[in-house]
Image (cartoon, coloured by chain):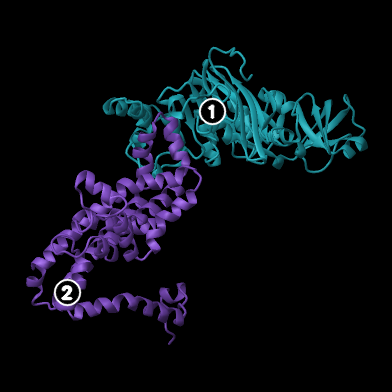
Chain colours: A purple, B cyan
Amino acid sequence: MTKRATSWDRRKRRPPVVLVILAVLGLSVFVIPLLGLLARTPWSDLPTLLTSDVVLDALRVSVVASLGATAISAILGIPLAWVLARVEFPGRAIVRGLVVLPLVLPPVVGGAALLFALGRRGLIGEPLNEMTGLVLPFSMWGVIIAATFVAMPFLVITVEGGLRNLDPRYEGAAATLGAGRWTVLWRVTLPMIGSSLAAGLALTWARALGEFGATITFAGNLQGRTQSLPLAVYVAMESDRGAAVALSLIMVVISLTVLIVLRHRWWGAL
Amino acid sequence: MVGGAVNHSTGLDAHLVVSRGEAFTLDVSLSIPAGHTVALLGPNGAGKSTVVAAIAGLLPLDEGCITLDGRTLDDPAGDVLVPAEDRSIGVVFQDYVLFPQMTVVENVEFGLRSRRVPRRSAHEQAMRWLDRIGLGDLADRRPNDLSGGQAQRIAVARALITEPDLLLLDEPLAALDATTRVDLRRTLADHLDQFAGPRMVITHDPTEAFLLADEIHVIEDGVITQVGTPDDIRLRPRTPYIADLAGSNLVLGTASAGIVTTDTQHLHIADTHISGPVLAAIHPRAIIIDRHQPDGSPRNTWEATVTRIEHYGDRVRLQTGDPLPLTAEITPDALSDLQIVEGSVVWISIKATEISVEKD
């Protein structure tokens, strides 16, 4: 008796074996560390660990700093993306290079540069301190600025890409219907690049949440003030492995949740 | 016209000069009185959309001047440039460009809301417009869920609701399939008739231009090559392009059982199902000219006098007289072989399959 071919067999050719093996290896690069984390999780101590001061302080710093950095990136980054996409000016290529520089720059270098510029003796930090008494490094503002520095490029390049892909005739049509530039921006441009904007915000926020190097260099590692989740994990690895695992789990859960909630917009735009 | 006095108190006067690099320069003069429809007819890449963008205010002129109802909208020499949002020009864009993130009614009320009309009142007016064009029950749909014909009527409503001073239609029928196009051409003609200001239709389709416009401007490579009434353009084309594209013979008649009857002639056609008023198109090259009565398959043959002979390079156009005046195209060799001169009597034959017929 001949075996009846299933529709799967007949419609799809079997993918090449080598490709499948490499793909599975590729996936394991992401999955194995997660399994390691789960294997080391002290499940019974978890409630105590998760409510410890170190963890709660770090969670608060991370949430405030990452959301703050995302908000600042949106307020400053969307106009920057618009200018890069729509205004022709000499040196635009250089400006675009400067914007993406933090993507390739080691974050520690970024943190050092921020310190030289905004530190108490820095280029801008010193006059700022003399005039207003404000001290940016080693404060919550320092954490937010460090995170903005490394994360805002994601927003700018994603939104700029969205603007470039938008058919300019939509904005033109709105203008002929009597819409001024602000109306066009609010009612046509931004809604039409909504998925790029959402993807940009998600990427920016995720990058800000994971920020380590620039933060520790510019804002330090003070529990309750500037110690974010990644910094707390780093410290706990030396002293309390259980706490390090608990902190790491929090970050995995937060990141996964955001990915799942935003998945439609996310995949739609990338 | 640059810097000159404006004679029309109402209507559009425009001299448009726009350079796109070294390769292409648009240089076009147009004048459309209120209540008149001008068609800008030309091939793709001739600069038609540049004309729309310049008049609508989406592309500044390099030279020239645009005046609408006596008001200067763009004048580089006088340093005047009124932005698009202050021009009051209704534009129906190619492919309609409805806002995909808004509902149909939000699209229609957009122009009113942009002009600070209160939300309630704008919504009511938009609903009245939609009801008038019979699309009231689509108010809450998204543009992506609409057919091409529905999208076109909504784009027209969106442009007209703000009561603009000029109506610009860029290829209003090109995105539609053949059957919808015939229906909507009539609806569009009604809209144009009801609009009091100057109207302009941009198209690459000669039939559209002939049926919608009072006057046709033919544009090729950025310049106007001929201006005239639809009959002028059809009967006396001045360039090979116009002769080729716009020179088709259009015959109005009534179809029944495979025959189109005009005032003076019966034409056999291939389509035996079509009936009622029709528009029959016969390409000049599909008309066979002979000195003697032809035998063979052509179903339509008759005798006529050659009234006019015009040469276009490697082609010759003959105008024939009664019973059904037509334009035929032959080669110069054929002309000399057949020894045809103005006044010669010739036999005309047309295969039924060469006559394309659509409902009028």
Q: Chain of mark 2?
A: A
**Residue, disc 1:** B55
Q: Neighbour class for label 1 at 10 Å: few (<14), some, many (≥20)? A: many
Q: Pick the residue in front: A93 or B138.
A: A93
**Which amino acid lies under the numbered mark 2 shown in the image of this protein?**
Ala
Helix, strand or loop for disc 2: helix
Asked whether, in this view, residue A138 is left or right of residue A187, the answer is left
Q: Pick the residue in front: B241 or B250.
A: B241
Q: Pick the residue in front: A9 or A25.
A: A25
Q: Chain of mark 1?
A: B
- Regarding residue B103, the answer to whether it shows in the image is no
Contact flag, marks 2 and 1 (Cβ < 8 Å): no
Residue drawn at point x = 67 percent, y = 22 percent: B229
**Which amino acid lies under the numbered mark 1 shown in the image of this protein?**
Ile
Q: Pick the residue in front: B247 or A240.
A: A240
**Mark carried by residue A236:** 2
Q: Is residue A213 above or below residue B195?
A: below
Q: Position of residue B326 (x, y in %)?
A: 75, 29
Helix, strand or loop for disc 1: helix
Quarter of the rendering occupied by the C terminus of chain B: top right
- Marks 2/1: CA–CA distance: 68 Å
Q: Position of residue A177 (x, y in %)?
A: 42, 30
